[in-house]
């Protein structure tokens, strides 16, 4: 029986879910910026907080599915080392955003986001970008969670071949 946290055959769950926090975290920084552009940015400050909390919940689900995929990688291999680095970077990123959410919770009625939190989130976003690149390398360079065979549609069109090459 397959593990539902890994997704179905040929349909991995973790890569499909990462899009949610990867989109929500930068959008929160956009809301922070908008809080500086208006005379009363309180709705944007609250919106940024809501986006970060939503992204943290999504990140928890993403982390669980990613950890299940991580356990299937051969221990000590090059892909495992890359996956461990990816895991560490992404957990650190989530920790920074969790700290941001905790600090924001105290000041939801301010007219603009405190500049220190904007800097914290900008740093966390830079770290997020590094983690995304590492995850991309796991899939596209190391073939993690990629089916080994060629799909029937590709074969019928004469487009078969070695999918492991870039």
Image: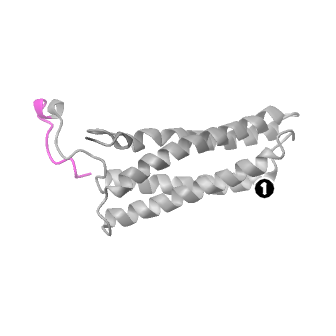
- Indicate left or right for 15 with 46 as reference: left
Q: How many marks?
A: 1
In the rendered view, would you say 25 is above or below 78? above
Residue beneath the point at 78% across and 45% down: 105
Q: Nearer the viewer, residue 80 or 45?
A: 80
Residue beneath the point at 81% across and 37% down: 37
- Indicate left or right for 92 with 31 as reference: left
Q: Is residue 126 visible?
A: no
Q: Secondary structure at mark 1?
A: helix
Q: Residue at the far front: name it.
A: 1
Residue beneath the point at 52% across and 55% down: 90
Q: Position of residue 3 (x, y in %)?
A: 32, 43
**Residue 87 highlighted magenta (yes or no):** no
| Magenta residue span | 155-166
In the rendered view, would you say 140 is above or below 153? below
Q: Quadrant of residue 76?
A: bottom left
């Amino acid at each position: 029986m397959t593990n539902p946290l890994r997704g179905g055959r040929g349909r991995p769950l973790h890569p499909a879910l990462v899009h949610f926090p990867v989109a929500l975290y930068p959008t929160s920084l956009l809301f922070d910026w908008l809080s500086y552009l208006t005379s009363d940015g309180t709705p944007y400050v609250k919106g940024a907080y809501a986006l970060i909390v939503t992204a943290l919940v999504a990140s928890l689900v993403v982390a669980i599915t990613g950890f299940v995929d991580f356990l299937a990688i051969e221990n000590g291999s090059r892909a495992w080392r890359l996956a461990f680095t990816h895991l560490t970077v992404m957990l650190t990123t989530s920790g920074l955003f969790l700290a941001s959410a905790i600090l924001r919770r105290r000041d939801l009625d301010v007219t603009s986001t405190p500049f220190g939190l904007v800097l914290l989130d900008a740093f966390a976003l830079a770290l997020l970008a590094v983690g995304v690149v590492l995850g991309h390398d796991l899939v596209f360079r190391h073939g993690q969670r990629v089916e080994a065979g060629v799909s029937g549609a590709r074969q019928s069109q004469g487009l078969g071949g070695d999918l492991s090459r870039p």
